[in-house]
Amino acid sequence: MDIAGLALFIQTILSATWRLATPMIYASVGEVFTERSGVLNIGLEGFMLLGAFAGFAATFFTNDLALGILSAIACGLLFGLLFAFFTVTIKANQIVVGAAFNLIGLGLTGFLYRAWFINKAQGIKAFGPINIPVLGQIPFLGPILFQHNILVYSTVALVLLAGFVLYKTAFGLAVRSVGEHPSAADTAGLSVTIIRYAGVLIGTTLTALGGAYLTLAHTNQFVEGITTGRGFIALAVVVFGRWSPAGAFWASLLFGLFYALQLRLQAIANITIPYQLLQALPYAMTLLTLILMRGRAISPKALGTPYQKSA
């Protein structure tokens, strides 16, 4: 491979990195709020599937992408309320509830897909790339940074807003307090239940949006299991990003790079590595990341622990 070919190879991988990282950015930034409030939601895969299907179905029947986005948001809120009811109000085991929502997401979307779309032409219009004038024509960097769709660009605003809310507002302080010392927060007059509900709903809504990205911007159709483990990787991203929105953003980009790399390597005709090994690369890196971060990342002290108000 000559220098020009190598440059094109690198550019192709880097230009796909941000796009492939986008669903994990939405899901992991949302999960940062959920876990910072003290609730562990391992059901991100299920919520992404539900959001992907809701967005696709609404757009398919209305031909309106805005309604598709709103439907994904509504789906995230509705199922998020159900998740919060079980984990915060009833105080059920959060691991069990999260696993149940993974199964619900997989089963419900698979059933509805087969019932409504299996014999129909499924293509929908999707968000197209926005080529930013002048910047999009910059050699090498143009396709990498300035030729993406609106949902990809929105991740920058999302991370900046999330960081501001979490670290510069009274609500963010309340979220962090409830996740660290819920009894102290309760004594100070904060409602642990309301704050945790808010943290859960922010997380499930953004996760559903991450799923909707897959059907409304990354592809133009829905297939069963379209998330292919991205929700589970988003959980690792939260740990790798040390429970901060900015950290989740950069960690998502790293995993997006692995996704882009394995897809590009599969496209090389003369490569001798079995494609199954290449497909496993993002998940292998997830396990490696968790091993490397073992003992280094400090989670919120009350994470996963239901709060029981003392008498």
Image (spheres, rainbow, N blue to C red):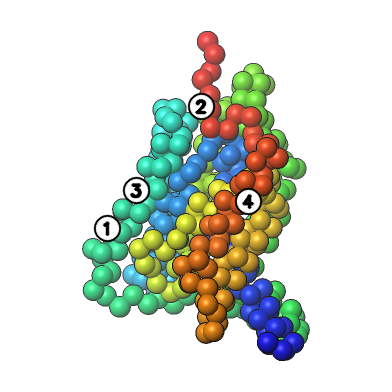
Mark 3: which amino acid?
Ile
Residue at the image position 55 percent from the left and 57 percent from the top:
284
Q: Position of residue 24 (x, y in %)?
A: 56, 58
Residue at the image position 41 percent from the left and 42 percent from the top:
99
The mark found on residue 273 in the picture is none
Q: Which residue is denoted by mark 2 in the rendering?
A: 306
The mark found on residue 289 in the picture is 4
SS at mark 2? loop
Image quarter hosting the N terminus: bottom right
Of circles 4 and 3, which is in front?
A: 4
The mark found on residue 104 in the picture is 3
SS at mark 3? helix
| 234, 217: nearer the viewer | 234
Mark 2: which amino acid?
Pro
Q: Which residue is denoted by mark 1 in the rendering?
A: 111
Q: Position of residue 34 (x, y in %)?
A: 56, 41
Residue at the image position 65 percent from the left and 62 percent from the top:
253
Mark 4 and mark 1: Cα distance apart in space? 34 Å
Mark 4: which amino acid?
Thr
